[in-house]
Amino acid sequence: MRKLIHLFLLIAFAGSAAAQSDVQYTHFTFNKLSYNPGYTGSKGAFDALALYRNQWGGIEGAPKTIHVNAHTPFAGRRSGIGLGLTADEIGKVNTNAVDLSYAYRIKLGGTSTLSLGLSGRLEQLRIRWSKADPLDPVDPEIPQGDEMSFAPNFGAGAYFLGKSYYVGLSVPRILKNGLYLDRSDTYRNQPTTYFTGGFITRLGSNVKLLPSVMVSYNPAAPVDVDMNANLLFMDAFWVGGSYRLGDSFDALAGMEFGNGMRLGVGLDFTASELEKVTTGSWEVMLGYTFKCKSCEVSHLRFF
């Protein structure tokens, strides 16, 4: 019975997440490229990121996600190009995606830049029926072998970077592409719109505050709000927290090394009904920004 309750809760909350179509990351403020192609190349140097997320620990079949991306400016930093790879697993369902993004950057005076981006995406969905554990091993309703489907998509976004703040607006997956096998399932295929914003301000000689927010709107799901604030000490390490509306309280900590490498960890403490059956979620982030002598972007490592 306990396993049945766990499975029911998992399906219910996973269904809500599927309506938004995109993986939610605790490190969203460090992983803007996943949500907005307009961010491509905005760091002013070649930048790479790897992230692993283990969601809802203690629940069998809970989501696990691996994401890596890299992007760089070119053509005198007037343009940017990026690549992203995502592997997401929930239960016996695997979703893999490849994203290619491009952004054109427009100087608006001073250090302000407006970037307009487009992305192309190829998604693969695989249901591994061979790993099913039915009560009846010859149940005719369970397909034999695996089922697989592919679907293309594209996205668009705008990203404005000022001297000490940023704002972004994007729809990373625009098409209702019917990736899921039930192509009439419009609930799952609704595109999500993201608004992001944040700034950096000095609190003392060696302390800075970096608050940020991400608002997600999907017609088939409640509005989702992620609010984050990090304290940055000596431009080297940070501690902070996030709140995901109706879902979790999160703790973050990380280190920015002098060679451009950064390492971060995040812990989610579930605040929804799932808290009864899960120990929470966690993420690990590893990134690297290659140094360059002529970089013009303010707060290169943090925006």
Image (cartoon, rainbow, N blue to C red):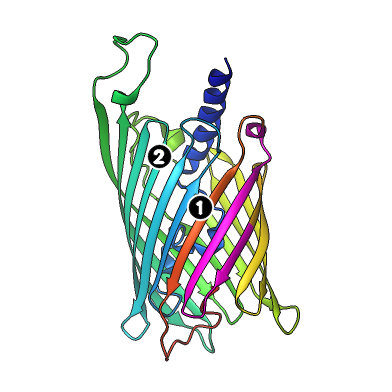
The quadrant of the rendering that contains the N terminus is top right
Q: Judge by depth and name the residue closer to the eye, 88 or 44.
A: 88
Q: Which residue is mark 1?
A: 193
The residue range painted magenta reads: 252-275
Tags 2 and 1 touching, CB below 8 Å: no
| Badge number at residue 89 | 2
The image's mark for residue 242 is: none
The residue at 37%/30% (across/down) is 92
Residue at image point 62% right, 47% down: 268
Quarter occupied by the C terminus = bottom right
Of all residues shown, which one is farthest toward the left?
145
Task: Work out how far the residue at label 2 is from the one at label 1, CA to CA, in angstroms.
Answer: 23 Å
Q: Name the side, left or right, on which 202 lies relative to 6.
A: right
Q: Secondary structure at mark 1?
A: strand
The majority secondary structure of the magenta stretch comes to strand
Nearer to us of marks 2 and 1 is: 2
Estimate the x, y position of residue 140 in percent, counting from the top left: 29, 10
Q: Is 238 above or below relative to 55?
A: below
Q: How many marks?
A: 2
Left or right, 52 with respect to 248, comes to left
